[in-house]
Image (cartoon, grey):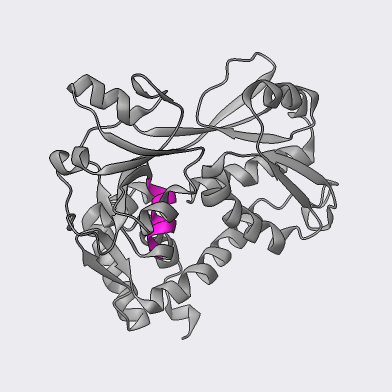
Amino acid sequence: MNLRNFDLNLLTVFDSIMTERSLSRAAEKLGMSQPAMSNALARLRAALDDQLFVRTARGMAPTPRARLLARPVRQALDLVQAGLRTRSPGETFDASSSTRSFVIAVEDYGETVIMPRFMDWLMQTSPGVKIRVRSEPGKSLFRKLREGRIALATRHGHPNDSELQVQHLLDDEFVSMVRHDHPTVGDTLSLEQYLSLPHVVFGRLGRKGIRNSLVDTELRRLGVKRKIALQVPGFQSMPVIVRNTNFICTMPRRMAQIYADYFQLKKLKTPIDLPPLPLYLVWSKSMDSDPEHEWLRKSFCEICQRL
């Protein structure tokens, strides 16, 4: 293929559809109308001589060719973004030769959704930079952020601390998953089915359900309860359990998509209205003027905006 005859803007279209698995969400993410997105996909299909994405009850499923293209396309787009951030010759900081170490605290959402993509990009642009990932409880996390012992942290809650900077990274929605050959669940999920199935859940189980669970808060508002069969300490183990049982789980869509692809799980619309789940980036105000820290957090944010 001659690149001069290929519209490189179509790569962002491909990447967005691959990530969102929905034409409407991909169009919204890129600020395009849905007809324009459909037209762009048609041009992509013609240029690459492949369907790339097939419409199913659970969204736009990538073809084998699309799956092969996904990583090199994402790497190319990330490298272009990195190039556009290159500083002028008079500035001293050079990310490509930096050997600095950073500690980043993330929850399991960050480990699964963000860090693989971020580290793939980092190893191409700044292979000497070292990252250590850790999980920290709230009080010790905020103290270590203030002390500079942790460079960045991702949090689903918005911390109220005058010494910390907070930036909104992204919002995610909740979806539910069952195994692909579940005996009672097809391609749609009713509220009656949802309530009748055994649930594996993340959170602390109390008398009123899972503490701080958006799902259980909404179910209580509706005057109903779900059947909680198993409580686990994080999202990551839920899909593994679902794959081997008749359980159902509800988790953030971007995480669910990764596990649905890997374990061949069904990803379904949760039959209740739930607010979006926000994710924030947190760091110490004392690090604002550090050029390497500024580079790290801006790069981290840009990767998140493309997820």
Is 262 left or right of 36, judged from the image as shown? right
Residue that appears at 58% across and 15% down: 160
Residue 284 in view here: no
- Residue 174: quadrant of the picture: top left
- Residue range in magenta is 252-261
Q: Is residue 120 depicted above or below 115 in this figure? A: below
The image shows residue 30 at horizontal and vertical percentages of 38, 51
Residue 101 in view here: yes
Q: Nearer the viewer, residue 256 or 42?
A: 256
Q: Is residue 292 depicted above or below 10 in this figure? A: above
The image shows residue 224 at horizontal and vertical percentages of 19, 26
Q: Nearer the viewer, residue 22 or 238?
A: 238
Residue that appears at 58% across and 42% down: 301
Disc tally is: 0
The image shows residue 144 at horizontal and vertical percentages of 75, 26
Any magenta on residue 42?
A: no
Q: Nearer the viewer, residue 261 or 102?
A: 261
Q: Is residue 281 depicted above or below 250 in this figure? A: above
Q: Main secondary structure of the magenta part?
A: helix
Any magenta on residue 255?
A: yes
The image shows residue 105 at horizontal and vertical percentages of 66, 37
Is 234 left or right of 181, judged from the image as shown? right
- Residue 210: quadrant of the picture: top left
Q: Nearer the viewer, residue 148 or 107?
A: 107
Is 60 left or right of 29, judged from the image as shown? left
Residue that appears at 40% across and 33% down: 277
